[in-house]
Image (spheres, rainbow, N blue to C red):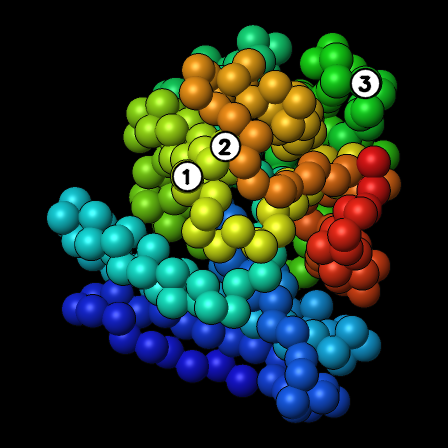
């Protein structure tokens, strides 16, 4: 089932979900997926058939925003935030799968610095680079060591078939958004990273803010066969759990309950490659004792 909801002007939210067939209609859980950079919510459709096994309703949300105007963009972000805030009465957990360092305001390690040519690459070249990095598998010397030298940032495993390779070009075009990748999805790269670091500190490491939605569980998750940057972020967030100020600066304190989780396998698209297993892992991550390493 799918539906459009017009929020304001040129801003629409598109919802698609697995419906409630096969669920206990009086007591089920809804898991809402919000896509990452470059792809739309269609990448989550493989999860839909497995929701009833857990009494879960699976939904995906895509914000459709067509205006190039800067002020419209600011209004979009404000309304998108309000849309999420509307869930607060029902919000029990937040899972961030393979988030980037940018969205937490954490500096990249020197070894992961982008190639200089990327600054001058065309839109199509940047999209091709990103798509390969996101869909590839990576072999890491030791993904659990917390040593950046044990993470692979540059060399995809050429012996593994990348995710989404089973799709035709037409099918891939239907679930990817190179235009959005080249425009609105680039906004996090232009915003001062300190703004993201302050926002993350307020959300996770501020006792006063933790009074709001105090029972919401937060999980930062990565697969151990994905791009090294994702595992570096998990390592840094685990370091922040032990000493918040070492990552998020003076004043950061232990405040909200959250855990980091490393899945035993999988890359950025584990929910496409192994949807049943991936959904099992995501649900298990919300258990009281967490899941994974």
Q: Residue at x 80, y 61 (%)?
A: 280
| Residue of label 2 | 205
Q: CA distance from mark 2 to mark 1?
A: 9 Å
- 116 left or right of 10? right
Up-down: is 22 above or below 99?
below
CA separation in Å, label 2 and label 3: 25 Å
| Quarter of the picture holding the C terminus | top right
> In which quadrant is the N terminus drawn?
bottom right
Local secondary structure at mark 2: loop
Q: Are marks 3 and 1 in contact (CB under 8 Å)?
A: no
The residue tagged 3 is 145
Residue identified by numbered label 1: 208
The residue that appears at 32% across and 46% down in the rendered structure is 184
Q: Is residue 60 above or below residue 104?
A: below
Single out the mark in the foreground, 3 or 1: 1
Q: Residue at x 21, y 48 (%)?
A: 74
**Residue placed most toward the observer, 253 or 154:** 253
Give neighbour class at mark 1: few <14, some 14-19, many 20+ (Cα, 10 Å): few
**Viewer-nearest of labels 2 and 3?**
2
The earlier-in-sequence mark between 3 and 1 is 3
The location of residue 34, given as percent across then percent down, is 51, 58
Residue 69 coordinates in the image, percent (x, y)? 15, 49
Badge 3: residue crowd in 10 Å (few <14, some 14–19, many ≥20): few
Which x, y percent locates residue 192? 31, 25
As displayed, is residue 173 above or below residue 254?
Answer: below
Q: CA separation, marks 3 and 1?
A: 33 Å
């Amino acid at each position: 089932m799918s539906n459009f909801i017009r929020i304001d002007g040129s801003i629409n939210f598109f919802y698609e979900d697995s419906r409630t067939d096969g669920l206990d209609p009086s007591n089920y859980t809804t898991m809402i997926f919000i896509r990452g950079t470059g792809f739309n919510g269609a990448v989550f459709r493989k999860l839909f058939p497995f929701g009833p096994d857990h009494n879960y309703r699976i939904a995906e949300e895509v914000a459709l925003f067509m205006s190039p105007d800067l002020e419209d963009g600011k209004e979009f972000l404000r309304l998108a935030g309000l849309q999420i805030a509307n869930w607060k009465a029902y919000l029990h957990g937040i899972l961030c799968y393979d988030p980037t360092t940018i969205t937490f305001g954490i500096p990249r390690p020197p070894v992961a610095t982008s190639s200089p040519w990327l600054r001058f690459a065309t839109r199509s070249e940047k999209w091709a680079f990103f798509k390969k990095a996101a869909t590839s598998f990576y072999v890491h010397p030791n993904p659990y060591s917390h040593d950046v030298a044990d993470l692979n940032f540059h060399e995809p495993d050429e012996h593994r078939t990348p995710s989404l390779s089973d799709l035709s070009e037409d099918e891939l075009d239907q679930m990817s958004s190179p235009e959005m990748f080249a425009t609105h999805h680039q906004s996090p790269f232009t915003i001062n990273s300190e703004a993201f670091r302050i926002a993350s500190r307020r959300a996770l490491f501020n006792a006063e803010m933790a009074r709001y939605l105090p029972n919401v569980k937060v999980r930062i998750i990565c697969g151990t066969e994905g791009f090294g940057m994702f595992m570096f972020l998990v390592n840094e967030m685990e370091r922040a759990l032990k000493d918040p100020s070492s990552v998020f600066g003076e004043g950061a304190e232990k405040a909200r309950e959250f855990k980091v989780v490393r899945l035993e396998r999988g890359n950025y698209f584990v929910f496409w490659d192994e949807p049943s297993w991936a959904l099992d892992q995501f649900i298990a991550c919300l258990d009281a004792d967490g899941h994974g390493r």
